[in-house]
Amino acid sequence: MSKCKQCDVIVRDDTEVCPLCKCVLDTDGEAENKYPDIWAKNHVLKLVIRIYLFAAIVTETVLIYLNYRYFNGIYWSVIVGVVLAYIYLTLAYTVSYSRAGYRMKIIVGVAGGILLLNVIDHVLGNNGWSVDYAFPAALLAVDVTVLFLIIFNRRNWQSYLSFQIAMILFSLIPVILNLMGYAHVPLLANLALAVAVFLFLGTVIIGGKRATTELKRRFHIK
């Protein structure tokens, strides 16, 4: 890389004269860093996460003391601690596995959120609302998100087929919990499963040969 002091422009090819004014180019002998430091931002984010972890530990320690000192029958410090831990783990996963696809990040985020709601439900008296309502509602929200992603990413819609199959398997969990007596709102659970199944079938039927080819490729079927 050379620079023309007359025109104040940078010339990136190997020529020795400026293509504008024909003056001899000045080379400083220093190699240009053509590739940006893609890890610099990652290092900053990791530092922020470590600072957050320290602040969260200090905050949770103070809250545990206050909860113990002025106990009113509810371990509310546990709820706050679980929320802080969920935020930390989400941030850490996003940074550590920055190359992971957003579909996997959605699955991990939803799974973590469901576990978080179950812990909150248990602390508040185990009323069952996390399994009866929160779990199926979260699955429905993900299905709607997938539908919008397919609509806005129509050139690569077939890549969501494996994700839709995973959502069907996830949607079976609340249905099974209802059958086993651990949940008591089968309507919402069945609705979540039906939406996941019909969304997958609609994608396969409308997608036609392109969808079946993608499924064969995903599952190594000849």
Image: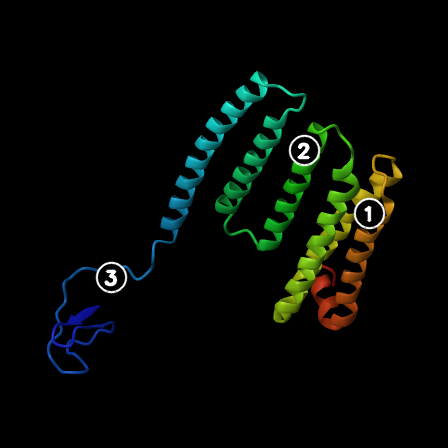
Q: In terms of sequence position, does the residue under pointer 3 or pointer 2 come before the other?
A: 3
Mark 2–mark 1 CB contact (< 8 Å) = no
Mark 2 lies on residue: 120
Classify mark 2: helix, strand or loop: helix
- The residue carrying pointer 1 sits among few (fewer than 14), some (14 to 19) or many (20 or more) residues within 10 Å by Cα, namely many
- The residue carrying pointer 2 sits among few (fewer than 14), some (14 to 19) or many (20 or more) residues within 10 Å by Cα, namely many
Work out which residue is located at the far top of the displayed protein and give it.
Answer: 69
Front-most of residues 135 and 162: 135
Classify mark 1: helix, strand or loop: helix
* Relative vertical location of residue 54 with respect to residue 144 in this rendering, above or below: above
Residue under the point 38% across and 54% down: 38
* Relative vertical location of residue 23 with respect to residue 203 in this rendering, above or below: below
Front-most of residues 4 and 183: 183
Measured Cα–Cα span from mark 3 to mark 2: 54 Å
Amino acid type at image mark 3: Glu
Measured Cα–Cα span from mark 3 to mark 1: 59 Å
Residue under the point 45% across and 39% down: 49
Report the disc number at residue 189. 1
Residue 209's image quarter? bottom right
Residue 222's image quarter? bottom right
Amino acid type at image mark 2: Ile
Compared across the picture, whether 112 is left or right of 198 comes to: left
Mark 3 lies on residue: 32
Amino acid type at image mark 1: Ala
In x, y percent, where is residue 112? 63, 40
Q: In terms of sequence position, does the residue under pointer 3 or pointer 1 come before the other?
A: 3
Residue under the point 59% across and 27% down: 77
Residue under the point 75% across and 66% down: 203
Observer able to see residue 219 = no
Classify mark 3: helix, strand or loop: loop
Measured Cα–Cα span from mark 2 to mark 1: 20 Å
In x, y percent, where is residue 201? 80, 63
